[in-house]
Image (cartoon, helix red, strand yellow):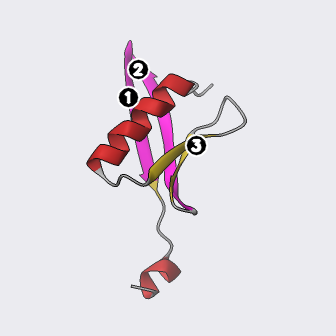
Amino acid sequence: MTPTISPQESDKLQAFLQKKLNPGIVVQRRQRADECAEIYLGQECLGVVSKIVDEGETSFSFEITILDIDLEEV
């Protein structure tokens, strides 16, 4: 089972990503507790963040998927 991202962790992740990447980023937890959180910039979902607990250490993985058709717009 995937570890759950708590509301407090979600808030901390949002503050971190806003500081490091863009002040408009919003972290939105999904309805199901066993899923990752989504990262939004405006109305666009940029990717997902998952919580990883391994040997007592906690980390978060931020995954962005970029479709080839999105690259054509650049």
Q: Position of residue 19 (x, y in %)?
A: 29, 45
Residue bearing the label numbered 2: 54
Question: Looking at the image, which residue is at 56% across and 40% down?
Answer: 37
Question: Looking at the image, which residue is at 36% across and 52% down?
Answer: 23
Q: Is residue 64 above or below residue 58?
A: below
Q: Quadrant of residue 55?
A: top left
Residue bearing the label numbered 1: 59
Q: Is residue 45 above or below residue 38?
A: below
The residue carrying pointer 2 sits among few (fewer than 14), some (14 to 19) or many (20 or more) residues within 10 Å by Cα, namely: few
The residue carrying pointer 1 sits among few (fewer than 14), some (14 to 19) or many (20 or more) residues within 10 Å by Cα, namely: few
Identify the amino acid type marked 2: Asp
Callout 2: SS: strand
Q: Is residue 18 left or right of residue 32?
A: left
Q: Nearer the viewer, residue 73 or 57?
A: 73
Identify the amino acid type marked 1: Ser
- Does the CB distance between marks 2 and 1 fall below 8 Å? yes
Q: Tell whether position 43 is magenta.
A: no
Residue bearing the label numbered 3: 28
Q: Nearer the viewer, residue 19 or 58?
A: 19
Q: Which residues are magenta?
A: 44-63
Q: Position of residue 51 (x, y in %)?
A: 48, 30
- Most common secondary structure along the magenta stretch: strand
Q: Quadrant of the N terminus?
A: top right
